Every structure is written in C-alpha cells, then in structure tokens.
Image (spheres, helix red, strand yellow):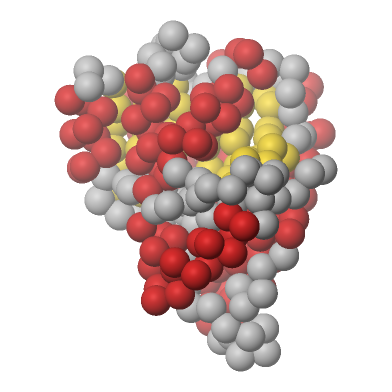
C-alpha cells in the first residue's frame, strides 16, 4: 500500500472531503488522525470498520493551543507525523453576496479559518515532520482562487492566499525535505457545497460542469487519488505546486 505506516493528520476530517481523505488514506495503510471542530465519530467508526488505524481529535484551527494539542496528541499516539492535509475551511458555513455587502465579521472569520488556520497547523506539525526526516503538507485551495468566484470574494481570496502560502512554505521547508503542495478542486458534491449553494445548487453545478472539458461534477472519489499521491513517496520530488482537480476548467 502506498502509505503503509505513514502518520497523516487530516483537518476538517469529520465529514465531506476530509472524511473521504481519511478513509482513503487509511485504506492505503496510513495511520490517520481525523481532527475537526465537528464530531469525528462517524469518520472514526467507518475507518475502524474497514480495519484501519485512526485517532479522532477535537481541533479549532483558529486556536494555536488547540493546533499544538493536536500535534502533541498525534505524536503521543503514533510517535511521528509524516503528512498534514490542511482541509478545514469555512465554505458551507458562510453566506454569499456582493463584495461590498459582505460583513466584516464574515470576512475575518473566513480568513481566520481558511488562512490563519493552515499557518497554525503547519507551525504545530512541522517540528515533528523535521524529527521524522521530512514529510508532506497538502493544502486544499480551490478553483475559486485561479478562476475567480463572484459573490464569494472572501472565500476566493482566502483560497488564493493558500496558494501563496504553499509556494512560500515549499521554499522555506524544502531543505528539511518537507514538501508543500496545494490541490485546487472545482465544486465537490459534499454537504458543504449543498449548504453554500442552497436553492441554486442544481443550476450552479450545471454551469460549473458546462465550463469544464470533462463535463461532470466532481465527487469525493475524484479527489482522493491526488491526495494519496501527494502524501506518498511517489511525489517525493514534487513541491510548491498547485494541482488543479477541476475537469479542465483552468489549465495552468
């Protein structure tokens, strides 16, 4: 298996994409830590039922003490950290609107979770990765960062910041053999997408698929292969990259 004995932390692991990443990496032999501000019991139960090794943790990525506790508990349980998937984000929990009508409070919350949260989780986990001799950080960005997303400028801006952070961290951490890459999907069929799009979901998904070379909406299964690749040694000389998983909407 591609991830045999690797220890990988997945933030936002309680549902949706994070849950799918945890399940897929456990199936590839990883010891997975599913960390989320939401309950992770469903993720833990599904991985254990399939014979996987998983630890569920409470995590508030906006709180540095919580991030450090996550890293400390991971090392206490498994002895190391090899991978970090920074998946936690505000998406379905926010309201869309014209740029000049968004509240300052929502803007700040989005930046705190989607940008500061990644920075803090990296700060917490990188020391253990250095101790392990290297590792892989995978930051979840979005098509919104490269294509643009009207009526969600806060979300799009936060995901563009993720790409800048990814490139900067890749240059800073490379000599420690810590790879840092981003994955930028189009809208994935998850609870978060349903919550964000609301009553216009069907129309919005049709427009998104229509703008792609591969005209279908993305599912969680379409994402997991890329995440496994970046977490594995198969990508050991890949860093600083943003991989678009968007059916050919943007071709970099």
Residue drawn where x is 72% and y is 65% of the image = 148
Q: Is residue 132 above or below residue 110?
A: above
Left or right of residue 212: residue 17: left
Residue 104: percent from left, percent from top:
59, 84
Q: Is residue 88 above or below residue 244?
A: below
Residue drawn where x is 70% and y is 50% of the image = 249
Residue 55: percent from left, percent from top:
29, 31
Residue 146: percent from left, percent from top:
74, 55
Residue 73 occupies quadrant:
top left
Residue drawn where x is 22% and y is 18% of the image = 51
Instruction: Name the quarter where the N terminus is drawn.
Output: top left
Residue 147 occupies quadrant:
bottom right
How many discs mark residues in the rendered view? 0
Camera-side residue of 215 and 53: 215
Residue extending farthest bottom: 101
Q: Is residue 163 above or below residue 113?
A: above
Left or right of residue 32: residue 211: right
Residue 210: percent from left, percent from top:
62, 57
Camera-side residue of 97 and 133: 97
Residue drawn where x is 75% and y is 49% of the image = 250
């Amino acid at each position: 298996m591609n991830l045999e004995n690797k220890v990988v932390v997945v933030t936002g692991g309680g549902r949706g994409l994070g849950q799918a990443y945890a399940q897929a990496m456990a199936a590839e032999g990883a010891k997975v830590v599913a960390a989320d501000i939401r309950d992770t019991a469903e993720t833990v139960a599904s991985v254990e039922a399939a014979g996987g090794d998983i630890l569920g943790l409470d995590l508030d990525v906006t709180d540095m003490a919580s991030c450090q506790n996550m890293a400390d508990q991971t090392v206490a349980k498994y002895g190391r950290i090899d991978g970090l998937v920074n998946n936690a984000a505000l998406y379905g929990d926010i309201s869309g609107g014209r740029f000049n009508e968004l509240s300052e409070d929502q803007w700040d919350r989005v930046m705190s979770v989607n940008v500061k949260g990644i920075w803090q989780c990296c700060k917490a986990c990188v020391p253990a990765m250095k101790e392990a001799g290297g590792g892989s950080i995978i930051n979840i960005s979005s098509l919104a960062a490269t294509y643009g997303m009207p009526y969600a400028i806060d979300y799009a801006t936060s995901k563009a910041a993720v790409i800048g952070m990814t490139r900067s961290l890749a240059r800073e951490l490379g000599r420690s053999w810590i790879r840092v890459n981003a994955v930028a999907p189009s809208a994935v069929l998850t609870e978060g997408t349903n919550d964000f799009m609301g009553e216009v979901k069907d129309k919005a998904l049709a427009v998104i698929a229509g703008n792609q070379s591969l005209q279908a909406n993305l599912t969680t299964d379409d994402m997991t292969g890329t995440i496994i690749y970046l977490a594995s040694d198969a990508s050991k000389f890949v860093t600083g990259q943003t991989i678009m998983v968007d059916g050919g909407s943007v071709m970099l």
